[in-house]
Image (cartoon, rainbow, N blue to C red):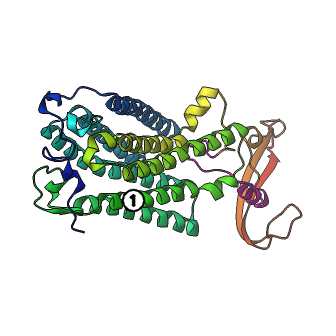
Amino acid sequence: MSIVHARLSISPSGHGYAASASTRIETDTVPLSVEGSHIIISSVILIVLTALWTCMRIWCVKQSGRGFVIEDGLSIAAVILFYGLIATDFVMVFSGGLGYHVNELQEWHLVRLLKAVYAHQFLYVASLGLVKISVILMFMRIFFAGRCQFAAIAIMALTIAWMFLAILVELLLCHPVRMNWNLQPPDGTCGDHKASFAAVGIVDVVNQLAILMLPVPMILRLEMQMRYRVLIVCIFAVSFLTLIFGAIRLYTALQIEFNDLSYTAVQTTIYGAGEVGIAIIISSCPLLRPLFDKVFSTSTSGNSIWDKGGTEASISSRNRKTARSSGFTQMNESQDNLELGNIGAHRNKRNTIVTAGRRPPSTDDEDDSSIHRIVVVSETIVSRDQGNL
């Protein structure tokens, strides 16, 4: 496409600058407007919440003894990029005049605003993309094995493709790149920004919906205590806020008027930061079981989506069936150290024999009893020592 960039209409001689120079803000730092205050307040709240949830995640990982894995590193990197995104929001408000109408700002305010908007787009895509990949890797580690991983890998490929799409659109839409913030007579061309927003936003919403639906079949088959079941429902309910924020951001981006960008882009900025911030918070929630148990002063039983080792694997009804029919009986310490009569008058010897083969059918087996099994037999031989009473 070779249409003139819509942002170029906000030049001193164009529409929106009809007001006299005396009515425009002349200070280097733009006073905080009502609309700008909404951005600052929401940004501060998101900074506090994401920092809190990230600290809780790190604490719970250390408590579990699991050790840091790749999704933890991606999540922390996403948080760092998110703080960079919030920094661009502050620049847009205090240096670029976001929240004011174009005819209230100086030209150099608008140049700063457009440069910050350009950086904001890259940070938004990078931060949200890393959160998505982190969540998918967590789901793969917890729930999926074998062929079930193909669905997760496909969604991860879609996520990476979405990141490349958004970055390439931002890099190639205007030529040369300075056209993204140039307010002088145009010396280049740009594509249709609204069409690019629509393409990137639609893929984003579809991608988020696929990620949210990915673990649902496995979660529905889990057996867990009621408090954990309620917790899982709450996590998924809040997770849909990310999807909702993404859809609203797409809608507000399509409503932007480029001849008054500094005022009409406020809602898009708020919902964009909210989408990424909520995604970071939600991605940490499934890992907070140690903190959850500590708050409610309950001991863990392993019947939830988390186990005692801090990993998030679950014992489903199918796993219980397999464990019951395998022929093994779990013994605790008191059962293992059984009293053997008069200690000192007897000597015991324990032999363990391991064989592999077919086991005869048993009425206790609910699954196929003809499968090959490993049978462990423990034998205790008790004898009386001569001369020891």
Rendering quarter of residue 165: bottom left
Q: Which residue is drawn at 79% across and 73% down?
A: 370
Q: Is the magenta stretch mostly helix, strand or loop?
A: loop
Q: In this view, does 151 lie above or below 112?
A: below
* The C terminus: image quadrant: top right
Specify whether residue 320 is in view. Answer: yes
Horizontal placement of 32 versus 367: left or right?
left
- x and y percentages locating residue 96 in the rendered image: 21, 37
Indicate left or right for 65 with 16 as reference.
Answer: right
Q: Which amino acid does label 1 sit on?
A: Ala
The residue lying at 76 percent from left, 44 percent from top is 347
130 left or right of 153 in image: left
Q: What stretch is highlighted in magenta?
A: 305-328
Local SS, label 1: helix
The x, y position of residue 338, in whole percent, is 79, 40
x then y, percent, for residue 363: 89, 63
* x and y percentages locating residue 329 in the rendered image: 77, 52
> Vertical placement of 117 versus 199: above or below?
above
Looking at the image, which is closer to me, 210 or 230?
210
**Where is mark 1, residue-wise?**
198
